Image: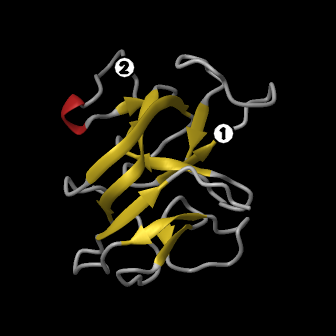
Amino acid sequence: MALLGDRLIIQDSIDFFSSGLMEKGAVAVFGVSPSGGQGVGLDDADAFCYVPTGASGTIPLGVVLQDVVSKDLTQTHLNFHKEEVQTGGKVTLVQRGWVTTNMITGTPKGGDKAYLANDGKFSPTFTNAAATPPVGVFKTKKNANGYAAVYVDLPKNNS
């Protein structure tokens, strides 16, 4: 589990489809379609997001609230108690508020700025605006299990 129930959601988004596997608590970024941009409507397939494997040049969009999985739905079903979403389905993203997650690299302290690490995790380490865009502020340090609370304020203009 990468996201605890201890959270406050002020604003979320259900505008985006998932592109690939995602773990709840990770930071998703804007996807750009081959046709050259995002979709406009709530059900436009060009409006998608993904968890980056390299944060450079990406724009953070929100914290993923569900696990995105790839299952053979003819053999089994999604685990609704875990709020699983099939790859390509709609995801809920926290854009403002705070969450408690273990998707963190480094050793933050309360009050440290939170940046997007290369793997969709939160990090207290800043490289530059393109490589590690800002995503919020750490509310707490990590506890013994590796969880910390993070204030989230997304999306941001990275310039």
The image's colour scheme reads secondary structure
| Mark 1 touches mark 2? (CB < 8 Å) | no
Residue tagged 1 = 31
Residue 39 sits above or below residue 114 on the image: above
Residue 120 sits above or below residue 18 on the image: below
Is disc 2 surrounded by few (<14), some (14 to 19) or many (20+) residues within 10 Å? few
Residue 142 sits above or below residue 100 on the image: below
Estimate the spatial distance between the alpha carbons at disc 1 and disc 2, rounded to whole Å. 25 Å
Residue 142 sits above or below residue 75 on the image: below
> Which three-letter amino acid code belongs to the residue tagged 2?
Leu
Residue tagged 2 = 73
Q: Residue at x 75, y 31 (%)?
A: 37
- Residue 137, percent across and down? 44, 70
Residue 4 appears in which quarter of the rendering?
A: bottom left
> Which three-letter amino acid code belongs to the residue tagged 1?
Gly
Residue 84 appears in which quarter of the rendering?
A: top left
Q: Residue at x 72, y 36 (%)?
A: 32
Under circle 2, the secondary element is: loop
Q: Residue at x 40, y 23 (%)?
A: 72
| Any part of residue 70 in sight | no
